[in-house]
Image: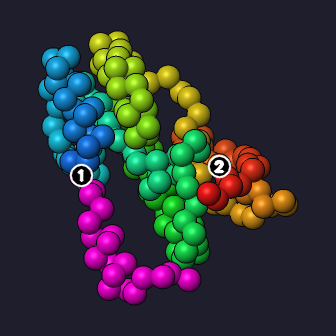
Amino acid sequence: MDRLSKDQRSRLMAKVRGKDTGIEIRLRKELWREGFRYRIDHKVHGIKVDLAFPRYWLVVFVDGCFWHGCPTHYTVPKSNREFWSEKLRANVERDRRQTKKLEDNGWRVVRVLEHSVKTNPEVVVSDISKIIVSGRRPRKTNDWRVISVEQGKDHSEIWTLEDLREGGMKRVERKAEKSA
């Protein structure tokens, strides 16, 4: 049960930034410093991408850990779990459709989770730089995302992960973090 009224929840959610987040700005500044020029919030085949490098046929999405099911940092909301579970599943499915459509149309797609930019922006910029310079597609790697979380035994959580690119699934049991 949500402790906030519908209006309070609506006002709170309206404050969540959809673009120009601190993480996006940090990545853009690092890329600019390295001499890369890009387009911001550019539409490619009807899909709004965070960064587009049209000359190199490359797009970059900066995905928030909560909104896009980061397998390392996703946190399960304490209230309104059914809503958030469906929201997460829909976000991951949309990410998959967008990635496939762009790749089918010849674009190279890089999806970066926010924690990567927070902890190692230089590595992220280096990886993007290598993709641009090489002219090759990013190497095929698994891009696991959380799509659902269930209660397991002994207060553990069972996370179902799905690969954005290959569509494979796996289940991982995690010990629930203790509340302070």
Residue 161 horizontal/vertical position (percent) = 65, 49
Residue 47 horizontal/vertical position (percent) = 29, 52
> What residue lies at 57% left-to-right and 42% top-to-bottom?
72
Residue 58, numbered circle = none
In the rendered image, which quarter contains the N terminus?
bottom right
Q: Quick check: 135 above or below 91?
A: above
Q: Look at the image and give the residue range highlighted in magenta.
A: 1-19
Of the pair 48 and 27, the residue shown nearer to us: 27
Q: Are marks 1 and 2 in contact (CB under 8 Å)?
A: no
Res 55 seen here: no
Give amino acid for label 1. Answer: Lys
In the rendered image, which quarter contains the C terminus?
bottom right
Check residue 10 for magenta coloring: yes
Q: Residue under circle 2?
A: 161
Q: Residue under circle 1?
A: 19
Q: Judge left or right: residue 76 versus residue 111.
A: right
Give the mark nearer the N terminus: 1 vs 2. Answer: 1
> What residue lies at 44% left-to-right and 56% top-to-bottom?
67
